[in-house]
Amino acid sequence: MPAMLIAGNWKMHKTAAETIEFGTALRRAVEPLEGVDVVVCPPYTSLDEAVRVLAGSGIEVFAQNAHWEKEGAFTGEISAPMLAELGVVGSLVAHSERRQLFAETDESSARRIAGVLDAGLRVIACVGETEQEREAGETEAVLRRQVEAIRGAVEDDDVHRLTIAYEPVWAIGTGRTATPEQAEEAHALIRSLFDVPLLYGGSVKEDNAAELLSQPDVDGALVGGASLEVESFAAICEAAAAAAA
Ligand code: PGA
């Protein structure tokens, strides 16, 4: 069985000083685990410290977003080559908070994905329906549209550097996780459209991780709130190691 991937999305949390403290404890907790690849996604200002404190631990550092151009007049943006120079190995793209709060579209997400892959980095691209879309019976149509946009941005040679995270928007930060059956149904659909590793995200916690990760088309998890404490994040990584065994 291939390794599971557990990625912690810190969102707008943890200063550089907090990152050093957290990283030191995290590497102690997860270094001994086998069968699980661990990623953290700190905010831009903590990336450098994260790369340094986690060097040699096997824990990899991703950004939370990146622009499609290498450089230019794009105030407030950061490019993939800038991230690569720090030792960052990938980026999230199209997280639902980017889509909902910062007007990210399928089109802009596709450009960001292409830019990050072009710089030689990896991408975790996020998809997922809102509660309204689920209730209107539009989940499948939304996922098809989002996944097709991602697929159109990826050259065949780069597919091995892409992971998709299914994150139903109604489950993010709400404590309402998808049932393992709902997650599996969405993952199976996504896999039928684009066969890449698939993470589930949305209120993943230590007490629901094992069941979600045991689904056949769930290859890991994208964890928000529960990734901010070493204890809960390490427990999820342990559940992934057990699921991979
Ligand atoms: P959550 O966030 O685990 O806090 O629900 C997941 C995410 O937004 O990636």
Image (cartoon, grey):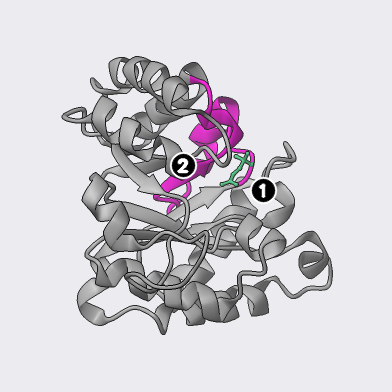
Residue that badge 1 annotates: 178
Total marks in image: 2
The three-letter amino acid code for the residue at tag 2 is Leu
- Left or right: 174, with 4 as reference point: right
Q: Which mark is residue 140?
A: none
Image height of 8 relative to 16, above or below: below
The x and y percentages for residue 165 are 49, 57
Q: Can the viewer see residue 144 in this picture?
A: no
Snapshot quadrant of residue 204: top right
Asked if the stretch drawn in magenta spans residue 163, the answer is no
Asked if the stretch drawn in magenta spans residue 212, the answer is yes
Say which residue appears at 74% left-offset and 75% top-offset: 138
Residue that badge 2 annotates: 213
- Crowd band around label 1 with a 10 angstrom C-alpha radius: few (<14), some (14–19), many (20+): many
Image height of 2 relative to 175, above or below: below
The three-letter amino acid code for the residue at tag 1 is Ala
The x and y percentages for residue 79 are 37, 63
Upstream in sequence: badge 1 or badge 2: 1
Say which residue appears at 60% left-offset and 33% top-offset: 225
- Left or right: 146, with 44 as reference point: right
Snapshot quadrant of residue 141: bottom right
Say which residue appears at 46% left-offset and 77% top-offset: 110
101 or 239, which is in the foreground? 101
Question: Marks 1 and 2, Cα distance to the nearest angstrom?
Answer: 12 Å
Say which residue appears at 32% left-offset and 37% top-offset: 48
The quadrant where ligand 1 appears is top right
Callout 1 secondary element: loop
The stretch of residues the image draws in magenta is: 202-229
Image height of 133 relative to 42, above or below: below
Image height of 198 relative to 56, above or below: below
